[in-house]
């Protein structure tokens, strides 16, 4: 049972799983460093990230930006404006 052979179907799931873990950790670290307008929102987003596992990070990145004091752009366009 070799999951790391590129031609096996399990390899695709391993890569997708690793990508999801990176996305989840990125969302959780952003949550810990964020300052929200309402202090209870950090607790609510923590519950969403922990218990809505398949869609939690996606929902967080889509909806939490409007609720932060200083919303940041996740992908800055500084390289495209030259």
Image (cartoon, rainbow, N blue to C red):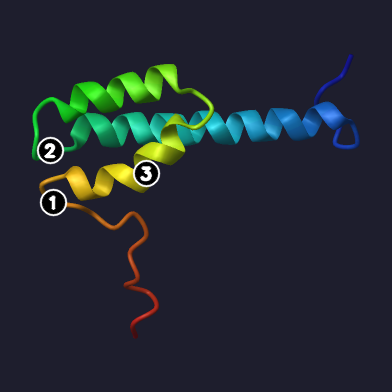
Up-down relation of residue 79 to residue 5 (above or below): below
Instruction: Tell me how far mark 3 sits from mark 1, CA to CA.
Output: 14 Å
Q: In the drawing, does residue 51 fall left or right of residue 46?
A: right
Q: CA distance from mark 2 to mark 3?
A: 14 Å
Residue closer to the observer: 6 or 9: 9
Are the residues flagged by discs 2 and 1 in contact, CB closer than 8 Å?
yes
Instruction: Work out whether residue 40 or residue 70 is closer to the camera in this orientation and state it.
Output: 40
Horizontal and vertical percent for residue 57? 43, 34
Above or below for 11 versus 74 = above
Asked which quadrant contains residue 13, the reply is top right
Residue hosting label 3: 61
**Which quadrant of the view contains residue 60?**
top left
**Residue reaching furthest to the bottom:** 82
Q: Residue furthest top?
A: 1
- Residue 19, picture quadrant: top right
Q: Residue 40: x and y, percent? A: 13, 25
Q: Residue at x 18, y 29 (%)?
A: 41
Residue at image location 54% in from the left, 27% down from the top = 54
- Marks 2/1: CA–CA distance: 7 Å
Q: Residue visible at 13% across and 51% down?
A: 70
Mark closer to the chain start, 3 or 1: 3
Residue 39 x/y as whole percent: 9, 28
The quarter in which the N terminus is drawn is: top right
Q: Which residue is mark 1?
A: 70
Q: Which of the numbered marks, if any, corresponds to residue 48?
A: none
User: Tag 1 or tag 2, which sits nearer the N-term?
Assistant: 2
The numbered mark, 2 or 3, whose residue comes first in the sequence reads 2
Q: Residues within 10 Å of mark 3 (few under 14, many from 20)?
A: some
Residue 10 spot, x, y in % from top left: 81, 26
Residue topped by disc 2: 35
């Amino acid at each position: 049972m070799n999951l790391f052979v590129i031609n096996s179907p399990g390899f695709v799931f391993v890569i997708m799983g690793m990508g999801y873990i990176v996305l989840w950790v990125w969302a959780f670290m952003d949550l810990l460093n964020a300052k929200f307008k309402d202090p209870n929102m950090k607790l609510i987003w923590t519950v969403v990230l922990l218990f809505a596992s398949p869609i939690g990070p996606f929902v967080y990145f889509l909806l939490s930006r409007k609720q932060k004091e200083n919303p940041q752009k996740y992908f800055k366009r500084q390289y495209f404006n030259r």
